[in-house]
Image (tube, grey):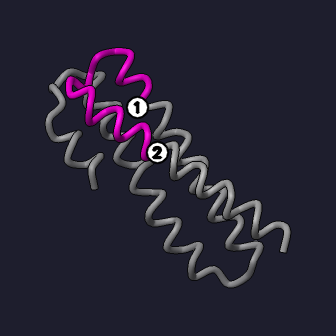
Amino acid sequence: MSIIKTCKYLDKSFASEHLSKQLIRSSTSVALNYGEARGGESTRDYLHKMKICLKELRESYINLKIQKGAGLISNILVLEQLIDENNQLISIFVVSTKNTKTR
């Protein structure tokens, strides 16, 4: 939700619009795929969806770093919070995936 709210305040340059649209797609994909993972029909299905979530989280992380480097998000505090939250989610999903594999 924070990403969507933040993207509302970006300028209307081509780069900002392109990256913000992709960021919204990748970050919302995590939530949607996690919902699918929780309802997975098997451990294999769960792991597959969790790996998709991780890919989307990593894509979102890189997107945020690009926007930071290009100065597209002017509120540095919000940007740093989004990057930190993204990193925390990556860590949580990695641990969850590893724990599921070892069961």
Foreground label between 1 and 2: 2
User: Tag 2 or tag 1, which sits nearer the N-term?
Assistant: 1
The stretch of residues the image draws in magenta is: 65-86
Q: Is residue 68 magenta?
A: yes
Say which residue appears at 71% left-offset and 62% top-offset: 97
Residue 46: horizontal and vertical position, in percent? 67, 72
Instruction: Tell me if label 1 and label 2 are in contact, CB under 8 Å.
Output: yes
Q: State which quarter of the image contains the C terminus.
A: bottom right
Q: Amino acid at mark 2?
A: Asn
Tell me the distance, in whole angstroms, between the alpha carbons under discs 1 and 2: 9 Å
User: What secondary structure characterizes most of the magenta part?
Assistant: helix
Residue 70: horizontal and vertical position, in percent? 34, 15
Look at the numbered disc 1 and give the secondary structure of its residue. Answer: helix
Q: Amino acid at mark 1?
A: Leu
Vertical position of residue 81 compared to residue 50: above or below = above
Look at the numbered disc 2 and give the secondary structure of its residue. Answer: helix
Front residue of 90/25: it is 90
Residue 74: horizontal and vertical position, in percent? 21, 23
Front residue of 24/64: it is 64
